Amino acid sequence: VSVKPVTDPDLAQKLNKNGKRVIQEAWGEPEEDPRQLIGYQLEDGTPFFDRYVILYGGRIAYRDCSMDGTTLCQKTGLHLHYGDDEQIHMYNDYMNKFRPLQEAGIMVLMSMVPRTDGVGIGSLYEWPNEEYWPWQENTNTPYPFGEDVTRAFIRDVVAELTKYQLDGVAYDEEYANKAGTAGPGLANVFPDLGVYQSFGATSEKIEKAWAKGGQNLFRFAYELQQAMPYPIVQDVYEIRFGSRLPESMTFNGKRVRITDVFDYSFEPNYGNWQGDSSNPMPKNRYGPCSIALADVDTAPLPPANDNGIGIKMRDHLDGDYGIVMYYCFRSRNEIKARWPNKYGDGIPEPEHYLSRISRELYGQNVIYVGNDYPRMYGPWAGL
């Protein structure tokens, strides 16, 4: 039954010192129990986090899963793929794992990530690299997918979102350049000049391919929005084709702006500060930094001392940016056990680090009032 999620975003309404709303969005892997997000609050009791994104929530795959020996997925062709026990457990237990967040006003989004098959949202509809590598020259079919296949995939996504009563999606195209052994295996979905010069891939042609990929992503998000039985939110991780989203597109004679389709975008390089979005999203819909909450080699923190993070958040406030994105969300117990000095100054608790952010934005500390939900899967399960 298609039921609109119970999320009431007004429950999480909080304004920064400028009187503007700033979304706090955490991305976490299916191994983590998302209910602990409810426990992070400002001192006045307002939830600190506004959104939770299930990292690797749905993999974009082109394969015949009915033939690969797994019982987790039996779909064929282009589909939204769940490839491990963690994902299945999380979704099958959505009433316990997701509904408490939604009742607290925290939206739950599914991230859509390419499954390293060389297929991304930006490669749907029209093959973006036609100008320098026509699809006919590649023996790996089924490119181009075209409208019929893409719309069937949209129906698959709609079915999954409504089944689990999710609030929306977050687009993460960072693996669109990975060619797997199952599926088309076209690594040039994300063209690179050094690799594809043999195909005549000049800088100008690559830029056109990026632009076409951005148009494909825009169109997909618009058609998904129109196909849903209830309104959804859509965020885009500003990487690969997401960085070339157009300002607007026309569908059936109607001009549709980027802000009509996408809610927020954000800088994807952890520890970096990018003050200007590379797509036309306005500052109040853009996050100039992504902050890691746990120790991952590829996701360094911004300066962890009070002065360093304080400067960044004052820049955030002065720029009237609209979102802060947090990556590598982990259980509080795991963070304290594995990285006891992660945040500097001997502070192991995430809420003390988050307070360095919230004091600048909201003038309040972050406190933790919830249970310690342990990691559910993996070598650190139970922490």
Image (spheres, helix red, strand yellow):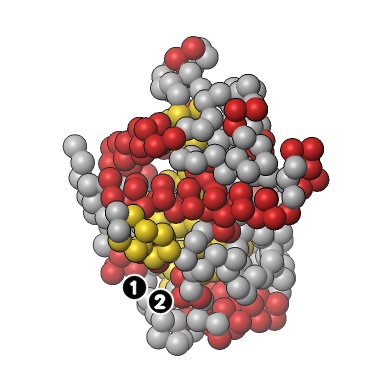
How far from the left and from the top, in percent, is residue 236?
49, 56
Q: Quadrant of residue 380?
A: top right
Q: Is mark 2 on a helix, strand or loop?
A: loop
- Looking at the image, which is closer to me, 143 or 17? 143
How far from the left and from the top, in percent, is residue 162?
28, 41
- In this rendering, position of residue 66 left or right of residue 300: left
- Looking at the image, which is closer to me, 7 or 344? 7
Nearest-to-viewer mark from 2 and 1: 2
Screen quadrant of the C terminus: top right
Q: Mark 1 points at which residue?
A: 13
Q: Which residue is drawn at 66% across and 59% down?
A: 269
Q: Which mark is residue 21?
A: 2
Dot 2, how many residues are within 10 Å of its Cα: few (below 14), some (14-19), or many (20+)?
some
Q: Are marks 2 and 1 in contact (CB under 8 Å)?
A: yes
Residue 60 appears anywhere in the view:
yes
Mark 2 is on which residue type?
Arg
Q: Residue at x 69, y 64 (%)?
A: 271
How far from the left and from the top, in percent, is residue 310?
63, 80
Number of labels in the image equals: 2
